[in-house]
C-alpha cells in the first residue's frame, strides 16, 4: 500500500513518505497469531499493510474483542507517545502483513514531521466518535454467516428470501457465493476482507446482516471469527470442509443437514444439528430455518384459568388468520390441554370442537360428584375423553415442541414435563386440588401448575423462543357486567358446592399477582377481559373465545413490529 493512504501520514510530501517508508520494516503473521499482548512493553508502532486484526482486552474467559482493524489502520502509536505498556492485545484474524516502526525511528519522524502528531490526534478523535456512537445506539446489527454447500443454492435462496420478508426492517444480504438470485450486495472481489469492511459500515443498521459463502471460501476462518453467529446448510462433507478452517470457533455452529438419516457427526463438538432435511424440503422446515437465522421464532405461553381457557382458542385463531407459525408451546392447567391439542396439529376451530367435547355439559355437571376415592366423577369422564383423543402417543411424537407445567407438592417447585407419555403428562397437568388426588411419579406428587406457575412464559423462552407471547387469564382487569347479548347459560347448569368451588376459586384468586408476574416475562402480553364468571362457566365458552380474539386483534400490531407472518409471503 502507499503510506499516503493511511490517515497517520496524510498531508506529508512524497519525499517525507519515502523517508518514513525507508525506516519501516515489513513483517508477516499467520492467522490467529498475536502481534502484541496487553501489558507488554510498547516498543513498536504498526501500520496494517494487508489482513485484519482483532483488538482484545482482558484474558482467558474475560477476553473481549472491542474492535477490528484492517488495511491502512495503525496501532501502538499511543504506547510509544505515552511510554506506557500495551493497553490491548492484537490478534490476527487472517494472514496479515504489517509495516512496523521501532521506538527510536518513531521519535525521529515525530521531530522531523510534526504534522504526524496532528494526524494522530485526528485518528484518536475518530476512534472516540465511533465509541460514542456505539454507546448511544440502542442496538447494533447482528452479523450472521450462512455457509452453504455447493448444490444448495436454490434452497439457500428460498431461506434468505423468507428472512428478507419476515424482518420488519428487512435483511441485508452479502453474497460471497454469487449463487443467489435476490436482492443482495455483491462484492466485486468476493473476498472476506471486503465483506468484513462492509459489515463494519453496516453495523448501525437495524436489520440483521447475513453473509452467504461456500464452505471452501478462502479466508473463511477469519469471517467465522468476525461474525456473531454461524450456520451451515449442507452435507457432512461440507461440515468437514468448514472444520478444516484455521478458525478457533467462538460459538457452536448451527447445522441444517442435507440428505442424511443420522445426527451423529463423529465427535465434531462445534457443530449442532438443528434440522435434518430430505431431498424434498418441507416448506415448514425452510420457514423454521429462516426464523432461526433472524431470531424470530415465536413461542406461546398459555395460562391457567378453567373455562376462560377458551380465550386461548380466540388468540390462536387470530394468529392463524394473520399467518403466524408458533414454534414453541408451554401451558399450565387448561393452557396445557389446549397446547396439547395444538401439538396434535389441530387448528383453532378443531381445538374448539374438541374442547367442547371434553368439557361437555354432562361432564361439567358431574364435577362436584365424587367417587369413593374422593375424585371428581366429572373429571374422570373428562380425562377418559382426553385419552380417546390423544391415544398412546409420546410427547416427542407431537408436531411442535410442547412443555406441560406442573407443581410438585413434595419439593414445592415447578416441574416441566417434556418427554412423557402424552396422556400421563396431561393427566398430571390437570390434577387440580379439590378435584382429584396429586399425580404420583416416583417421589413426586404433581398437581396443576396454577399453584406455582400460572403462566409459563419463562419456560417458553428457555425452550428457544426468540419472541414470547403470553396469555394471562387470571387478572383484575375484568368487565363490570356481562354483555347483554351473550350465549345461553342453560346448557351448563353445573352444581356448585360449598367445598370444591371455593377451594378452586380461592386458589385462582391468590395466584392473580403471580400470574401477572409470570406473564410479564414475555415480550407480548395478552390479558383478555372477562365478565363476572367462574372457573367452570363453560356455558360462556363462546364469550371467552371472543375475549381472546379481541385482545389478540388489538395487540397484533406489536407482533408485527418484531416479525412479519410467513404465510403472507406466499
Image: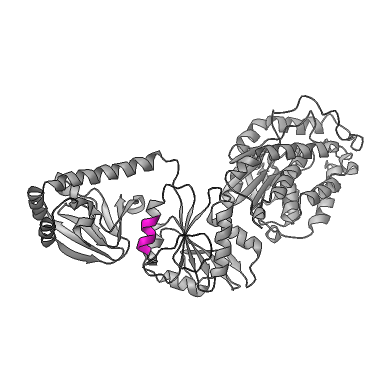
Inspect this view and state whether residue 136 appears. Answer: yes
The percent coordinates of residue 110 (x first, y second) are 10, 49
Where is residue 396? Give x, y as percent. 68, 60
Residue at 73 percent across and 32 percent down: it is 529
Q: Which residues are magenta?
A: 192-198
Residue shown at the point (83%, 42%) measured from the top left? 375
Image spot of residue 426 (x, y percent) = 74, 50
Q: Nearer the viewer, residue 160 or 494?
A: 160
Say if 543 sits above or below 147 in the image: above
**Is residue 495 found inside the magenta-colored segment of the image?**
no
Residue 197 lies in the magenta stretch: yes
- The answer to whether residue 412 is visible is no
- Quadrant location of the N terminus in the rendered image: bottom left
Q: Quadrant of the C terminus?
A: bottom right
Q: Is residue 92 above or below residue 369?
A: below
Q: Is residue 545 left or right of residue 552?
A: right
Left or right, 19 with respect to 337, comes to left
Q: List x then y, in percent, for residue 32.
A: 31, 63
Amino acid at each position: 500500500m502507499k503510506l499516503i493512504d493511511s490517515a497517520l501520514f496524510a498531508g506529508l510530501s512524497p519525499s517525507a513518505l519515502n523517508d518514513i517508508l525507508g525506516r519501516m520494516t515489513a513483517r508477516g503473521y499467520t492467522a490467529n497469531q498475536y502481534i502484541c499482548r496487553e501489558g507488554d512493553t510498547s516498543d513498536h508502532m504498526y501500520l496494517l499493510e494487508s489482513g485484519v486484526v482483532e483488538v482484545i482486552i482482558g484474558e482467558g474467559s474475560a477476553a473481549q474483542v472491542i474492535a477490528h482493524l484492517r488495511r491502512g489502520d495503525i496501532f501502538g502509536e499511543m504506547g510509544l507517545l505515552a511510554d506506557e505498556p500495551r493497553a490491548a492485545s492484537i490478534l490476527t484474524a487472517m494472514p496479515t502483513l504489517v509495516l512496523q516502526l521501532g521506538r527510536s525511528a518513531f521519535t525521529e519522524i515525530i521531530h522531523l514531521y510534526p504534522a504526524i502528531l496532528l494526524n494522530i490526534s485526528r485518528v484518536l478523535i475518530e476512534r472516540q466518535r465511533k465509541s460514542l456512537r456505539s454507546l448511544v445506539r440502542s442496538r447494533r446489527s447482528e452479523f450472521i454467516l450462512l455457509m452453504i454447500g455447493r448444490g444448495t443454492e436454490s434452497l439457500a435462496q428460498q431461506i434468505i428470501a423468507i428472512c428478507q420478508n419476515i424482518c420488519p426492517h428487512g435483511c441485508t444480504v452479502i453474497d460471497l457465493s454469487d449463487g443467489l438470485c435476490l436482492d443482495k450486495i455483491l462484492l466485486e472481489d468476493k473476498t472476506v476482507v471486503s465483506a468484513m469492511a462492509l459489515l463494519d459500515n453496516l453495523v448501525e443498521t437495524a436489520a440483521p446482516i447475513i453473509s452467504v459463502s461456500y464452505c471452501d471460501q478462502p479466508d473463511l476462518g477469519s469471517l467465522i471469527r468476525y461474525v456473531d453467529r454461524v450456520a451451515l446448510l449442507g452435507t457432512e462433507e461440507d461440515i468437514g470442509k468448514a472444520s478444516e478452517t484455521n478458525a478457533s470457533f467462538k460459538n457452536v455452529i448451527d447445522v441444517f443437514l442435507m440428505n442424511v438419516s443420522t445426527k451423529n457427526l463423529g465427535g465434531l463438538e462445534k457443530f449442532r444439528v438443528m434440522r435434518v432435511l430430505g431431498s424434498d424440503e418441507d416448506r415448514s422446515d425452510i420457514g423454521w430455518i429462516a426464523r432461526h437465522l433472524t431470531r424470530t421464532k415465536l413461542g406461546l405461553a398459555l395460562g391457567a384459568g378453567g373455562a376462560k381457557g377458551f380465550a386461548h382458542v380466540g388468540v390462536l385463531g387470530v394468529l392463524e388468520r394473520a399467518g403466524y407459525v408458533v414454534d414453541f408451546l408451554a401451558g399450565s392447567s387448561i393452557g396445557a390441554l389446549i397446547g396439547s391439542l395444538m401439538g396434535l396439529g389441530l387448528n383453532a376451530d378443531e381445538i374448539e370442537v374438541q374442547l367442547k367435547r371434553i368439557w361437555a355439559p354432562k361432564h361439567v355437571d358431574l364435577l362436584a360428584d365424587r367417587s369413593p376415592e374422593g375424585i371428581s366423577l366429572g373429571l374422570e369422564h373428562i380425562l377418559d375423553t382426553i385419552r380417546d383423543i390423544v391415544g398412546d402417543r409420546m410427547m416427542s411424537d407431537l408436531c411442535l415442541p410442547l412443555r406441560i407445567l406442573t407443581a410438585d407438592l413434595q419439593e414445592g417447585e415447578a416441574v416441566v414435563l417434556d418427554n412423557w407419555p402424552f396422556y400421563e403428562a396431561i393427566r398430571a397437568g390437570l390434577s387440580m386440588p379439590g378435584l382429584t388426588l396429586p399425580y404420583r411419579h416416583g417421589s413426586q406428587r404433581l398437581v396443576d401448575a396454577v399453584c406455582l406457575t400460572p403462566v409459563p412464559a419463562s419456560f417458553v423462552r428457555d425452550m428457544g423462543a426468540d419472541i414470547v407471547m403470553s396469555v394471562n387469564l387470571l387478572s383484575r382487569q375484568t368487565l363490570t357486567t356481562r354483555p347483554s347479548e351473550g350465549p345461553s347459560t342453560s346448557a351448563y347448569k353445573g352444581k356448585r358446592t360449598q367445598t370444591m368451588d371455593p377451594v378452586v376459586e380461592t386458589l385462582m384468586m391468590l395466584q392473580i399477582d403471580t400470574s401477572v408476574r409470570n406473564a410479564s416475562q414475555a415480550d407480548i402480553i395478552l390479558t383478555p377481559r372477562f365478565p363476572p364468571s367462574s372457573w367452570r362457566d363453560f356455558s360462556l365458552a363462546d364469550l371467552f373465545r371472543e375475549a381472546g380474539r379481541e385482545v389478540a386483534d388489538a395487540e397484533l400490531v406489536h407482533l408485527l413490529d418484531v416479525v412479519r407472518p410467513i404465510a403472507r409471503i406466499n
